[in-house]
Amino acid sequence: MTEYAPLDLPDDPKLTRNITHFARALRAAGLPAGPGRVADAIRAVAAAGFTEREDFFYTLRACFTSRPEHRAVFAQLFRLYWRDPRYLEHMISMLSPAIRGVAEDRTAEAAEKRAAEALLQGVEREAPAIGESEESETEIEIDARLTMSSEERLRSLDFEQMSVAEMAEAKRILARMSLPVPPLKTRRRIGSAHGPEIDARRSLRRAMRTGGEMQALARRQRRTRWPALVALCDISGSMSSYSRAVLHFLHAVSNRHGQGWAQVHGFTFGTRLTNITRHLRARDVDAALAAAGAEAQDWEGGTRIGSCLHEFNRDWGRRVLGQGAVVLLITDGLDREDPERLSKEMERLHLSCRHLIWVNPLLRWEGFAPKAAGIRAMIRHVDSFRAGHNIASLEALAYAVSRPYDPGEKARMLAAISR
């Protein structure tokens, strides 16, 4: 067993305690800042010294970050905790729009709000500055008491009814979610040592090398490939609370490897169509959504579903819907345009993809009926009709993707229309 040398603490014990409190805030923000990394950070600071703030920053960053997406959160937490003497006023002004503070003159940077929420947990007065006296030192208490019952309640809570703290916790749950997909079997065959089929052509070719003697049979199997995922997300005023949560979920899907998707494409639409695929590929979710929000200029505006679907079918359909793509259409279907045009564009979209899933948050109402003309025009051209108003409904998407013949609520909606 490896023996570790005893821990040599820096000369100033208050700095050691501050590093420990800083690690707690990092852990609350989602970084893997466990006890081992805290000990490594203390050793590293003792070895590197504490003379330059830049050296101190890179020393702690090397100890507490292991992925590129961690760096933005770490940089904001370091600035707020160690370098800004008015960090508490700054964080409160960011989290509460009614309070004016030092964040009044600028917009929040990537990962800044998440860092502020992590540092504000249990903090009632300003954190100690480096080298501050023992009496003025503030300990950051992290409340990690999250019982299974409260998490289950959060999974069934409507996104629109969540508080700021509940939405922050919901986003952390969404970041851990996945959307795996089974592979598609094609008509093409590839050689395989244990394939279920005999490859007669390869077997005869091998026999020619031995004078026509068949020594072993070559085998083959069907080739598999992975489909693409295309998400069309409505960002109109009636969908703003749900679209932000769905985009967090899509960011987690697009950045999680090993789920089977060949590519993940994201589009937003309200009064116009916007391609946000390249923004979703950013490692940090705050930076990704900030860039997507800057790209899409029609947030919380009107809805022109038919026109946006026409633009998608005309400009992007052949580019992203090949190879049996799965399409997620996230919208409430409340459109004021011509329902005949909407039905025509939905039919074209349905014929261009392998599986079309409509995620509608209005299904949260028990007595929901397809009375709107836009919903009646769209429902006939989807494979599955499902709810999308909470975490549990988004988790059910994995079931819908793995079982393409499950129509969800589509049969009930069609029965209501035919009455």
Image (cartoon, helix red, strand yellow):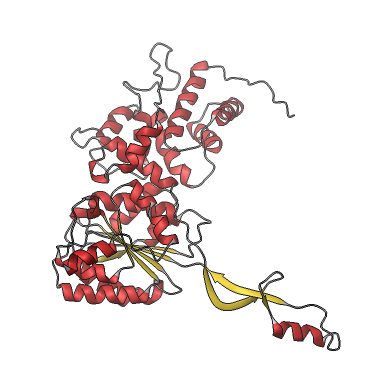
Q: Position of residue 390 (x, y in %)?
A: 31, 47
Judging depth in this view, the residue of 39 and 217 nearest the camera is 217
Instruction: Name the residue located 48 percent from the left edge and 29 percent from the top edge.
Output: 23
Instruction: Name the residue located 37 percent from the left edge and 63 percent from the top edge.
Output: 406
In the picture as drawn, the residue positioned furthest to the top comes out as 135
| Residue 112 shown left or right of residue 70 in the figure | left
* The C terminus sits in image quarter: bottom left
Q: Position of residue 405 (x, y in %)?
A: 39, 66
Q: Is residue 3 above or below residue 58?
A: above
| Residue 183 shown left or right of residue 340 in the figure | right
The answer to whether residue 282 of the structure is visible from this angle is: no
In the picture as drawn, the residue positioned furthest to the right comes out as 211
Q: Is residue 48 above or below residue 242?
A: above
Judging depth in this view, the residue of 200 and 389 nearest the camera is 200
* The N terminus sits in image quarter: top right
| Residue 269 shown left or right of residue 141 in the figure | left
Instruction: Name the residue located 42 percent from the left edge and 13 percent from the top edge.
Output: 133
Q: Position of residue 145 (x, y in %)?
A: 40, 27
Q: Quadrant of residue 282?
A: bottom left
Q: Quadrant of residue 26?
A: top left
Q: Position of residue 278 (x, y in %)?
A: 40, 61
Instruction: Name the residue located 30 percent from the left edge and 72 percent from the top edge.
Output: 312
The answer to whether residue 159 of the structure is visible from this angle is: yes
Q: Is residue 159 above or below residue 185?
A: above
Judging depth in this view, the residue of 267 and 76 nearest the camera is 267
| Residue 416 shown left or right of residue 16 in the figure | left
Label count reads 0
